[in-house]
Image (spheres, rainbow, N blue to C red):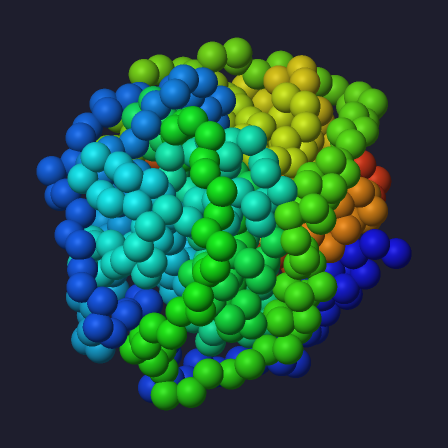
Amino acid sequence: MRGEAARRYHQLTKHSYWKVRLGPHGLDWANQPIPFKLYKGLEPIPLPRDLPRTGAPALEVVGFPPWPGPGRPTLATLASILFFSAGITKRMRYPGGEIYFRAAACTGALYHIDIYLACGDLEGLEAGVYHFGPHDFSLRQLRRGDYRGVVVEAAGHELSLARASVVALLASTFWRNAWKYRARAYRHVFWDSGTILANMLAMARAHHISARVILGFADDAINHLLGLDGQREAVVALVALGQDGPTGPPPAHVPALHLETVPLSRHEVHYPEIAAVHKASSLADGRQAALWRRGLSPLPTPKVEGRLFPLPPSPPRQSDAIEDVILRRGSTRRFARRPLALEELAAVLACASSPVPSDVTVGEGLALNRLFLIVNAVEGIPPGAYMYRREEHALELLKEGDFRERAGFLALEQPLGADASVDVFFLSPLDHVLEELGGRGYRAAQLEAGIGGGRAYLAAYALKRGATGLTFYDDEVTFFFSPRAAGTEPMFLVALGLPAYRPRL
């Protein structure tokens, strides 16, 4: 069976009632990893702090198609995209130190995703390969010269990369998340990359710069370019930003990098399950990458079996600028048990389910996931379990009833799931995805759900509502939404509602 290692990993890392109780995990606070990758000996290149403001209404850029024109980023617009994707937006002091919160949500606030850039000459920045350091809002040059051709070749000459002004490369240092979440951290690699990408796609659109997510690439070649070992730290997604005409051929030789970094913690714990599933889903060369991206066929559309509740067709009102929405975004810690307006839910679902501009995009909605909901309190529709039908922009009622307490249980017994107005689950027909796309399809399904969840966050905060990502009891979620959800696996859960405290405006 294709994707057998991914299926095995997914089964191994499922949460269940008894597994959670029989396998408690204490946190070694003295060994907590630092939240930044810090290079020794590389001079910082400060990014502009006077960022150009787009003023683009958030609901007009979140989930919308990428900009179709030949927009080319400058250093200033690139700085804006980086800041509003992964920059430090808030600081919170506590007795043991200080937490630096970022622009996008991250599991456990552990921030294990780093952004690198490969670019030609830009206004204000010479061609090179760079690492983005959120801690001092600077770039550090790892290689001098134009290495975009290496990326293009590794990705099988994917067209958007071949024309890109800049390639953003997202990489995870697994230990920085596995310190808390152990082997399940590999799922979080894509959840947390996805929320960053939701912001990045919206900001690129706001700046009139095209953006496309690429998952088909030769892993070893890309990791070698950045000096990553591919075992404890690896690239998981590429983004083609802007259009610059055809990229030149790759250099004849790409020497190995030997760059020293500050140790993350006293010692690292290796989780072989992560290394195994990542290796099993890797691609060897550009030819494999090109073949892989041709493998997906559209998901079958299930027939309507329950009562349909049509949703309002347009956003309910003008929203604040995307920059302001990202700055006030957070993870809601307490919901009031009050209803959302139906038009608000409609706007969030439209954004969350929009097609992701990527090399696995098929059709007019999400390619690898469908949205299932537990509605606790939404004006105009009864409480119950629903499936969102993007084709009809309607909710199909699966079963009516008060499922607040069940929602809290499914969300790993967290009160947020019960208190939320709506819980939105991203479910993927995983066997179909693995059959079509092999083990790498697992990465794609998780990442697509992470992007959708990140878009739901942004849309909710654009409406001055709250949102938070939650984990879940895997098989219990599928069982709850069955028989309609039979054969699917939950990838992501985001809870929506009205904060129980006054939101930041």
Residue 12 horizontal/vertical position (percent): 72, 69
Extreme residue toward the top, this view:
313
Q: Quadrant of the C terminus?
A: top left
Residue 463 visible in the picture: no
Asked if residue 284 is positioned above or below residue 39 in the image, the reply reads above
Extreme residue toward the right, this view:
1
Left or right: 276 as drawn, with respect to 68: right
Residue 159 horizontal/vertical position (percent): 56, 31
Foreground pick, 391 / 138: 138
Foreground pick, 41 / 112: 41
Extreme residue toward the front, this view:
252
Foreground pick, 157 / 280: 157
Left or right: 388 as drawn, with respect to 295: left
Asked if residue 67 is positioned above or below residue 185 in the image, the reply reads above
Q: Residue at x 53, y 24 (%)?
A: 350
Q: Residue at x 34, y 73 (%)?
A: 259
Q: Residue at x 44, y 66 (%)?
A: 255
Asked if residue 109 is positioned above or below residue 407 in the image, the reply reads below
Q: Quadrant of the N terminus?
A: bottom right
